[in-house]
Image: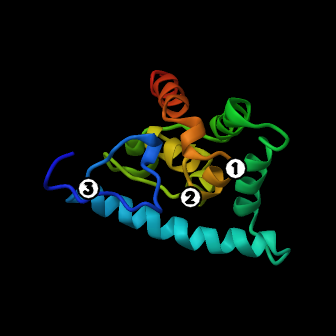
């Protein structure tokens, strides 16, 4: 382990079961913004689960997670990733947002039904999907395969 990297907390499993290093700069700022949106979305999802008012986009994310119900392991991962894949039409950020790179939180992606590789990955690895399918189970290959396939489309 590098000396300048703080050891990970015992309470937090490494992302995709791999060691990670802190990221700084623009990339970290983009992630913090999306993570804050995901935290707000989690509150909405909690209200939905409590049978309170539930926006259509939140119900869509819950329905995606429900695709894996009754399955475990890779079967559950495959069903959830397939549902995410079918919910998002591959669209480059320049075409959708007019900028070279835009990271959308899950609700924004599902509301537009459009996104690029990182938008797909953000939905697939959002806390809601991870609760149904722990990262250790799914690894990164499902996201990578789908993203490669999606970004290769014309």
Q: Which residue is mark 2?
A: 108
At horizontal 77% and vertical 60% (from top left) the residue drawn is 59
N-terminal-most mark, 2 or 3:
3
| Image color mode | rainbow
Per the image, label 1 sits on a secondary structure element best described as: helix
At horizontal 62% and vertical 69% (from top left) the residue drawn is 42
Residue 24 in percent (x, y) is at: 21, 58
Residue 65 in percent (x, y) is at: 73, 49
Per the image, label 3 sits on a secondary structure element best described as: loop
Residue 90 as seen in the image, left or right of residue 27: right
Where is the N terminus found, in terms of image quarters? top left
How far apart in space, not on screen, are marks 1 and 3 (Cα)? 26 Å
Q: Which mark is residue 123?
A: none
Residue 125 as seen in the image, left or right of residue 103: right
Per the image, label 2 sits on a secondary structure element best described as: helix
Q: Are marks 2 and 1 in contact (CB under 8 Å)?
A: no
Residue 54 in percent (x, y) is at: 78, 70
Q: Which residue is mark 1?
A: 132
Q: Between 97 and 80, which is closer to the camera in this rendering?
A: 80
Residue 46 as seen in the image, left or right of residue 22: right
Neighbourhood count class around disc 2 (C-alpha, 10 Å): few under 14, some 14–19, many 20 upward: some
Q: Which residue is mark 3?
A: 22
Residue 39 in percent (x, y) is at: 53, 70
N-terminal-most mark, 2 or 1:
2
Neighbourhood count class around disc 1 (C-alpha, 10 Å): few under 14, some 14–19, many 20 upward: some
N-terminal-most mark, 1 or 3:
3
In the image, is residue 121 above or below residue 23?
above
How far apart in space, not on screen, are marks 2 and 3 (Cα)? 26 Å
């Amino acid at each position: 382990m590098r000396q300048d990297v703080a050891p990970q907390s015992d309470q937090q499993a490494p992302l995709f079961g791999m060691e990670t290093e802190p990221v700084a700069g623009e990339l970290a700022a983009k992630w913090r913004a999306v993570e804050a949106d995901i935290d707000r979305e989690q509150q909405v999802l909690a209200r939905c689960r409590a049978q309170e008012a539930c926006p259509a986009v939140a119900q869509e994310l819950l329905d995606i997670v429900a695709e894996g119900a009754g399955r475990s392991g890779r079967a559950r991962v495959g069903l959830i990733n397939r549902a995410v894949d079918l919910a998002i039409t591959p669209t480059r950020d320049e075409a959708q947002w007019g900028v070279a790179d835009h990271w959308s939180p899950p609700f924004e992606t599902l509301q537009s039904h459009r996104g690029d590789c990182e938008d797909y990955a953000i939905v697939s690895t959002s806390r809601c999907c991870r609760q149904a399918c722990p990262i250790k189970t799914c690894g990164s290959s499902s996201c990578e395969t789908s993203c490669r396939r999606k970004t290769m489309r014309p």
